[in-house]
Image (spheres, grey):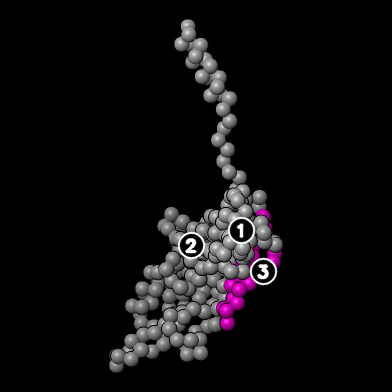
C-alpha cells in the first residue's frame, strides 16, 4: 500500500512539471543584392567583362533575439539565390604567356543561409554564409565566356558554394551595425559601395 502511495505522489509531481518551452523565433523577409563584377586577375579596364552583373539572395530568415545585448544573433533560412555575374580571369596561351579572359556565371536555386549580426560596439563583424546541398533541389548553373573550356568547366563545378561570383558566401556586412534584424527599418536600403560594386541589404517585412 505504501508503494502505491509513493507512486501516486510521483505521478502527481511529474504531471505538474512545466512543459519545456521552445524559444520564440523572430521571422523576417530579407533581400541581399550585389551589383558589379569580380576579379581573379587584372582590372575592369583590362578585362572585357560587364561591370553591372547582379546577384540576388532573398527569402525568409528566422532567429532567436532574446539573448544578451552584446551577444550576436544568428538567423537561419533557405533562401533563393540568383546569380548573373562576370569574372575576370586569365588563360595560358600556347606560347606560355597569360592572357586575360572573362567568364559569365549564371545560376539559380535554393541555398541554406546563415546570417550572424553583431552590434558595432562589440567590434565583431556581421557576416553571411551560404551552403547548397542536393536535398534543396536542383541548382541550375552555367558558365561561358572566352576562358579555357576546362577552366570554365571547373568554375561551373564550384557554383554556388565556392565560386567568387556568388558574392555572399563568407561576406562581411559592415553596413549592418545592429545585432538583430529588428534594428533595421523596413524598406530602407543599407548600402556598401566599393568602386563600381554595390551591395544592398533590405528588410522587406517582419513576419513575427
How many numbered discs, if any? 3
Where's residue 146, x and y in %? 41, 84
Which residue is tagged 2?
Answer: 130
- Sequence order check, earlier mark of 1 and 3: 1
Label 2 vs label 3: CA separation?
A: 21 Å
The residue sitting at 48% across, 62% down in the picture is 130
Does 181 sit above or below residue 157? Answer: above
The residue sitting at 54% across, 71% down in the picture is 55
User: Few, some or many C-alpha atoms within 10 Å of disc 1 (few <14, some 14-19, many ≥20)?
Assistant: many
* Part of the protein shown in magenta: 187-206
**In contact (CB < 8 Å): disc 2 and disc 3:** no
Q: Secondary structure at mark 2?
A: strand
Which residue is tagged 1?
Answer: 179
Does 26 sit above or below residue 86? Answer: above
Where's residue 179, x and y in %? 61, 58
Where's residue 108, x and y in %? 50, 66
- Sequence order check, earlier mark of 2 and 3: 2
- Sequence order check, earlier mark of 1 and 2: 2
Which residue is tagged 3?
Answer: 189
From the viewer's perspective, is 183 left or right of 9?
A: right
Query: Residue 116 is drawn in which quadrant?
Result: bottom right
Q: Nearer the viewer, residue 7 or 120?
A: 120
Label 1 vs label 3: CA separation?
A: 17 Å
User: Residue furthest toward the front?
Assistant: 122
Instruction: Give the main secondary structure of the magenta stretch.
Output: strand
Amino acid at each position: 500500500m505504501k508503494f502505491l502511495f509513493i507512486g501516486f505522489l510521483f505521478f502527481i509531481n511529474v504531471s505538474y512539471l512545466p512543459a519545456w518551452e521552445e524559444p520564440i523565433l523572430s521571422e523576417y523577409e530579407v533581400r541581399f543584392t550585389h551589383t558589379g563584377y569580380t576579379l581573379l586577375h587584372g582590372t575592369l579596364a583590362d578585362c572585357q567583362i560587364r561591370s553591372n552583373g547582379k546577384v540576388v539572395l532573398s527569402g525568409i530568415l528566422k532567429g532567436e533575439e532574446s539573448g544578451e545585448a552584446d551577444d550576436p544573433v544568428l538567423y537561419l533560412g533557405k533562401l533563393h539565390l540568383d546569380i548573373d555575374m562576370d569574372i575576370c580571369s586569365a588563360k595560358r596561351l600556347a606560347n606560355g604567356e597569360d592572357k586575360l579572359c572573362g567568364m559569365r556565371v549564371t545560376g539559380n536555386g535554393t541555398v541554406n543561409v546563415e546570417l550572424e549580426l553583431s552590434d558595432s560596439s562589440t567590434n565583431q563583424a556581421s557576416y553571411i554564409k551560404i551552403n547548397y546541398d542536393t536535398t534543396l533541389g536542383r541548382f541550375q548553373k552555367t558558365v561561358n565566356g572566352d576562358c579555357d573550356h576546362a577552366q570554365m568547366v571547373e568554375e561551373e563545378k564550384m557554383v554556388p558554394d565556392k565560386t567568387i561570383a556568388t558574392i555572399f558566401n563568407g561576406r562581411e556586412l559592415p553596413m549592418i551595425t545592429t545585432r538583430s534584424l529588428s534594428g533595421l527599418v523596413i524598406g530602407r536600403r543599407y548600402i556598401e559601395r566599393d568602386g563600381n560594386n554595390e551591395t544592398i541589404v533590405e528588410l522587406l517585412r517582419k513576419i513575427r
